[in-house]
Image: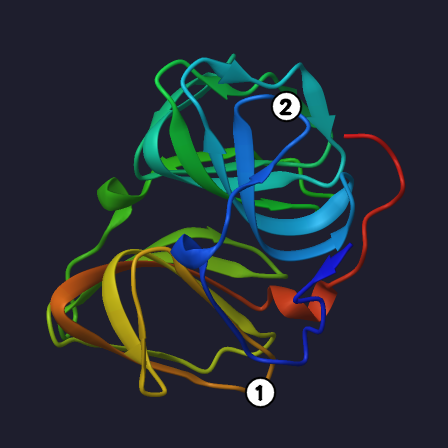
Amino acid sequence: MEINADFSKRVVVHSDRLEWRPSPVQGVARRMLDRIGDEVARATSIVRYAPGSRFSAHSHPGGEEFVVLDGVFQDEHGDFPVGTYVRNPPTSAHTPGSAQGCTIFVKLWQFDPADRTPVRKHMEAELGAPVNGVATATLHQDGRETVTYSRLDAGAALSCDAPGGIELLVIDGEIIVDGETLGKHAWLRLPEGQRLSATDTAKGARVWMKTGHLRFVKAPAAQPL
C-alpha cells in the first residue's frame, strides 16, 4: 500500500474529513496520512482507540513516535494524557491500549536504527517564553531531525526553512499556509527546499512540527511488528 508516498511533493490532508479505517485489532481505527507498506509500514496516521481496546504485546523494530491528541493512552510504562509526546525507539516493546479511549498521532519506522533513547514529555510543560507571540519547545533533536511543539497567539506567524523537509500537525486552533486554512488535525508535509510560512487566525493554535527527516525516507524491512 502507498499513500502520499511521493516525498518530493507538497501534501495537505484535512484528516478530520477522512473516514476511519479498521485496524487488525477490534476497537482500533486509523486515518492514514502517509504510508509505504501494509501492516508492516513506514506510516504516519491518526489512530483512535475505543474505550477498553488494546493491542497484544509487540515490539517496534523501526521505532514508534506519537502525540496523545485526546483521552489517555496506556501501556506498562504508564498513563499518557492529552499533550504527551512519546518516542519508543527501535527494539522497544509494549502492550498499548486505553481504558477510557484515546486518539493519537503516530509515526512508525522513521527512526535512526541506532537510536535507543526513550522520550516521554508533556509538551506544554516544555514551552519556553513566547517570542513575537510564539512559545516553542524542542521535544527531540539529533543528527537526523528536530521535533518541536509551538503555541501561537492569535495573529502570530510561524516560519521555517530548515533543510531536509518539514512536517506539521495542527493539534488545535487554525493556521493559514499559502492561503489555505488548516484546522484541527490538519497535516502538512513540505519537501526539502520548500519554506513554511504560516500565520495564525484569530483563534490561536498549537502545532507539532518535525524537520530534517525527509532525507531519510525508506520502506521498512519485511518483518512482523
Q: Which is more N-terminal, label 1 or label 2?
A: 2
Q: Is residue 49 above or below residue 18?
A: above
Foreground residue among 6 and 161: 6
The amino acid beneath tag 2 is Val
Which residue occupies 73% across, 63% down?
217
The amino acid beneath tag 1 is Gly
Which residue occupies 57% across, 74% down?
165
The quadrant in which the C terminus is found is top right
Whether residue 123 is visible: yes
Which residue occupies 68% across, 80% down?
8
Whether residue 110 is visible: no
Counting from the top left corner in percent of width and height, residue 1 is at 78, 54
Give me the disc on residue 111. none
Q: Which residue is mark 2?
A: 25
Compared across the picture, whether 122 is left or right of 218 comes to: left
Q: Which residue is mark 1?
A: 193
> Residue reaching furthest right?
222
Compared across the picture, whether 61 is left or right of 119 comes to: right
| Disc 2 packing (10 Å; few <14; some 14–19; many ≥20) | few
